[in-house]
Amino acid sequence: MRKQLIVNLRPDGSVAAETLGMTGDECLAYITALEDLLDATTTQSSYTEEHAGVPVHDRVVQPDEEHGA
């Protein structure tokens, strides 16, 4: 499976991100890059059962209030 970062913008302005095709903590680098691009901070994060094998990593990213976003 190829590596994917699926990003969904929610009506309330929050961003939900999901990684596919990544194992272990590899997904964290992608989420960190997304946080940097959006000038945002992760507010909720979870691993699925597949984390040890082929994980899907879900995170909710909110814009940092101090940056006026």
Image (spheres, rainbow, N blue to C red):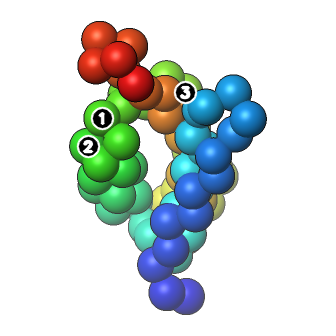
Q: CA distance from mark 3 to mark 1?
A: 16 Å
Residue type beneath disc 1: Asp
Q: Position of residue 44 (x, y in %)?
A: 54, 27
**Quick check: 41 left or right of 14?**
left
Q: Amino acid at mark 2?
A: Asp
User: Which comes sooner in the sequence, label 3 or label 1?
Assistant: 1
What residue is rendered at 63% in x and 46% in y? 9
Horizontal side, residue 11 vs residue 64: left or right:
right
> What is the three-letter code of the residue carrying label 3?
Gln
**Is the N terminus in the top left, top right, bottom left or bottom right quadrant?**
bottom right
Q: Residue 36 in the image: x percent, y percent? A: 26, 43
Other-residue count near label 1 (Cα within 10 Å), few / some / many at <14 / 14–19 / ≥20: some
Q: Residue at x 45, y 70 (%)?
A: 22
CB-based contact (under 8 Å), mark 3 and mark 1: no
* Farthest right residue in view: 11
Q: Residue at x 46, y 78 (%)?
A: 3
Measured Cα–Cα span from mark 2 to mark 3: 16 Å
The image's mark for residue 39 is 1
Residue 44 has which mark?
Answer: 3
The image shows residue 44, relative to residue 16, as above or below, that is: above
